[in-house]
Structure formats: C-alpha cells, structure tokens
Amino acid sequence: MFRRFALLAGLCAAALVVPALGGCAPTDAGRAGPSLPSSQRERDDLIKAAQQTLVERCLTRRGLSLEGARDEDRQLQGALFGKGRPELAVTLPTGYTVRAHTDGCLAAAQRELYGDERRWFRTQVVVDNLRAEARQRMKDDPDYRVAHGHWVRCATPAEGPRPARPDPETAARCERESGLDEVRARLEPVLLARVRTERHDQLTTYRQLRTRALHRAADLYAARTASDNRQKGSTSS
C-alpha cells in the first residue's frame, strides 16, 4: 500500500520537464521518428512524463483528476491501480511476492508504452530486485554469517527491553565494529554480477521493452507538441 501512496504522490507532483526533441531519427521499427534524449536521466524523465500524460487522459475519461488528490481517495486509487483481486503476481527468490492489477489507468498507460503489460510487469519486478536477490544470497556466505552474528550481539542491549531494531547510530557503529559493512562491500559486487549474468534474458527483455516505451513516449510528446503548435497558430491567426 505504501508503494501505491508513493506513486500517487509522484503522479500528483508538478509536471516533469521533458527535454526538447529535435529532428527525426530512425526508430526501432525502421521508420522516421523524433530523435531521442541523449542522457539516461532525460530518457527516464521522458517515459515518466508520457506515462503521467496517459494516466491523466485515462482518469479524465473516467471523470476523475489527480489534481488535489489524496492518498485515502479510494475511488481514485481504484481507477489508478485497479480493483479486486490482482491479476498479476511475481514471487521473487527473496520470497516476497509482488502483485498488480490490469484494470487501472496505470496498467492502461503501461500497455500503451510497453505493448505487453504482463511481460513488462514480470520483467520489471525481477530487474528492480536484482540487488535484493544478491543480498539474499549473501546470507549463505560463511563470512557474512559470522559478521552478522557479531553485529547482532553488538546491536542487542544487554539489559532492558529489546527494540525491534537498533537506532541508526548504533546500527552503523556495530556494522563497522563487526566488520559487516566490509563483508557486504566485498561480496555484493560479486554476487550482483552473478545474478545479472543468470538474469541475462530478463535484462535483455527489459532493455527491449524500455526502448519500445522510449520511442512511444517520444511519439506522444511530438504529437502533443504539434497539436499545441497548431492551436497556437489558429489562435494567433
């Protein structure tokens, strides 16, 4: 539910500044299309802006708006994220299951951008959790288990009630003293590289779908810009 609230807040935020798209360039389909931003951050912003535009159009057709929206607005949440039992689910190697609906405006926007919502959902969930998968594997390493045991003893008070988790200052100090931070720094890059190799197919699909979404977002932005220019021209004439 927290993830939904965070996404709702993001969608309600001020419109993203989309980099200017100039000229035309061949797209992945071989046709001419708008040239794409050069930096990864600008490309991410372009996809986010396109998704926001598509979500807002979908909500408008349903007589709703993100403007002034609140997290507890159940009607808006249902329109955004879908209702009832989630149709999509992916269980990660960490044991955590991620679920999503296919009937909300967010799902409709992702279908428009990525083409295959189910495929995108499965791939995105796996790729977004590669680091978590690597950290899960880290728990099987003998050096990690020893260091983590030292950390637990350091972070657990000898007397009095035991808190659910130590305060950040104590946790950081115990990570240094137990050597846990050093073990993590050594193991995580190795395990993450191993996980990425094993998830090569998902990473390839992820990049392909992101490229599709990027070109679709550029087309949407170019169409919107052309429409705005036509309206300005008709107003000034």
Image (cartoon, rainbow, N blue to C red):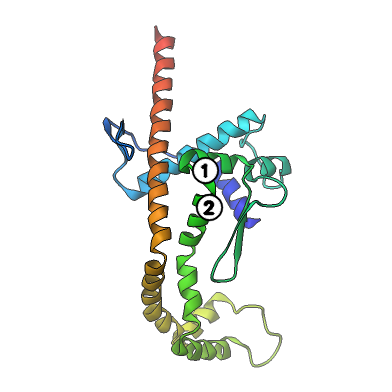
Asked which secondary structure carries label 1, the reply is: helix
> For the view shown, which residue lies furthest in the top direction?
237
In the image, taking residue 210 as reference, residue 136 lies left or right, namely right
Crowding around mark 1 (Cα neighbors within 10 Å: few <14, some 14 to 19, many 20+) is many
Picture coordinates of residue 25, whole percent (x, y): 27, 34
The residue that disc 2 covers is 121
Q: How many marks?
A: 2
Closer-to-camera residue (142/88): 88
Picture coordinates of residue 50, whole percent (x, y): 46, 37
Residue type, numbered disc 2: Phe
The residue that disc 1 covers is 110
Asked which secondary structure carries label 2, the reply is: helix
Closer-to-camera residue (153/52): 52
Q: Quadrant of the N terminus?
A: bottom right
On screen, residue 189 above or below 142 = above
Closer-to-camera residue (57/155): 57
Quarter of the image holding residue 214? top left
Picture coordinates of residue 165, whole percent (x, y): 62, 78
Task: Tell me which residue sits at (39%, 13%) in the image.
Answer: 233
Viewer can see residue 16: yes
In the image, taking residue 2 as reference, residue 210 lies left or right, namely left
Viewer can see residue 14: no
Dot 1 and dot 2 residues touching (CB under 8 Å): yes
Task: Tell me which residue sits at (51%, 86%) in the image.
Answer: 148
The residues bearing labels 1 and 2 have C-alpha atoms spaced at a distance of 9 Å
Residue type, numbered disc 1: Gln
Q: Name which of mark 1 and mark 2 comes first in the sequence.
A: 1
Closer-to-camera residue (9/113): 113
